[in-house]
Amino acid sequence: MDEHELNKRANKKIFFMELQLFGINHKTAKLSDREMFIINDSNQEDFINFINKTFGKKIESCFALSTCNRTEVYLYADEFIAKEVMLKTAEFMGTEDLLQERFYIFQGLKAKQHMCSVASGLDSQILGEQEIFGQFKQAAQFFTHTNALNGNLKFLTDEVISVAKAVRTDTNIGLNPLSVSGLSYKIVREIFEEPESQRVLLIGAGQMAQGIAEHFHNKGIKDISAVNRTRKNLIINQNLSLETHPLSKLQYHLQQTDILISSIASLLPLVGKGLIENVLRVRKNRPILLIDLGVPRNIEYQVKELENAYLFTMEDIEMVTQENLEERSFEAKRGHQMILAMINGQDSQLEERRVRNDIYQLLKEIILEIDAEFLEEIVNSSDPKETLKFALQHPDERLERLSTISPNVLSSMIKEIKSA
């Protein structure tokens, strides 16, 4: 569709709905900016309420994904609305100043292609990482459970997950995979000559923390414990289970710890410079390694100033992501080609379903405004669109959207709505 037609439709306010997204990631913003724009356990429900209250029927469905690399919002909504949603969301979250140079927007086929790249790990800071596929599915499940993700966007998201699974199965992007867990262990190995003899403390009990516990345990580190806001009994695998300690006991457990790894959702740092100073005194300045995987960060950056405290953040992990990069880059190209081929194959069916669903929803809205006595006349009319115009008794620009379907299909839809 050319620019003239787009402007014409925009000016007439005749909108179809389509897939759109906006976001901020490791390519467009540094960690200190990304951690200001997070949609996670602490604010997901507030975000959903904000979307519903602010945009109503303009957004059919939405969900958000926040990881250490990115925060993205996916929408099935009126065309051209993504920028408005982005601006209002940033205002809602108090991050207006980030917008112009940090955020990106995609729509239609490009949005779907980007979602597939994200879910399969092809758009990650750690190319081909393992964790992102699970994080993407987990975010979709949460928003489905709250009924924010449904309809066309649910259908699209299921397709994205299917494509991402195929990419990870049919390419070698997952061969000798890099992961946050693996990279964290690599840092441990570079700091300590005998990692197996070190004591590890995890802050958090989510998917990331459990993955790290399993990876470290498989590498021979057996002394692993965890603190969390709520007590949980974590069954990691048949050989490893952890019962978390309360977060209030953090300082005590830190005094016994050689390696701290934090990956908990928190708007403010949980570990401050003063706390680590106290811990180092009790430890008689025995070194401690701290790996902060939180976004926003869980550990105050000033901890880096302390002697015998070695702090690594997500930005530092970039230094150890080069392993097998050439091989993974080749497989990533194959993955992108697969994504294009698969979504192009899906597109004709999806477009047909999308148009029919949009028309169906529009007809339901229009029919609610029509007296029951007119419905039978509309169904039996040879030109139901003209009869609808007469029944509404006023010009209605929404009827322009009915021109894409035949009179027979239109009559069939109206019968179906009438009998529902």
Image (cartoon, rainbow, N blue to C red):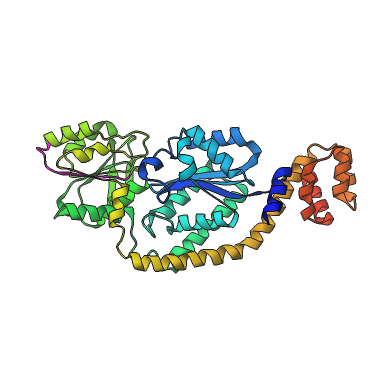
In the image, is residue 298 above or below residue 9?
above
Left or right position of 62 against 261: right
Q: Residue 6: percent from the left, percent from the top?
A: 68, 51
Q: Quadrant of residue 345?
A: bottom right
Q: Is residue 175 visible?
A: no
In magenta segment, residue 170: no
Q: Residue at x 16, y 40 (%)?
A: 256
User: Where does residue 134 sit, x and y in percent of width and height?
Assistant: 43, 52
Q: Nearer the viewer, residue 398 or 245?
A: 398
Question: Is residue 227 visible in this depiction of the protein?
Answer: yes
Magenta residue check for 288:
yes
Instruction: Give whichever of 151, 172 is nearer the camera.
Output: 172
- Residue at horizontal 36 percent and vertical 44 percent from the top: 31
Image side of residue 348 versus residue 366, left or right: left
Residue 9 location, x and y as percent?
A: 72, 48
Quarter containing the N terminus: bottom right
Which region is colored magenta?
Answer: 283-293
In the image, residue 219 lies at what x, y percent?
23, 57
User: Compared with residue 305, is residue 320 higher up or lower down, i.e. above or below?
Assistant: below
Q: Which residue corresponds to the image point at 38% horizontal and 63% vertical from the top-left?
A: 174
Q: Give the left or right position of residue 219, taking residue 8 as reference.
A: left
- 62 and 226: which is toward the camera: 62
- Note whether 197 is above or below 295 in the view shown: below
In the picture, which quadrant includes the C terminus? top right
Q: Give the total number of marks visible in the rendering.
A: 0
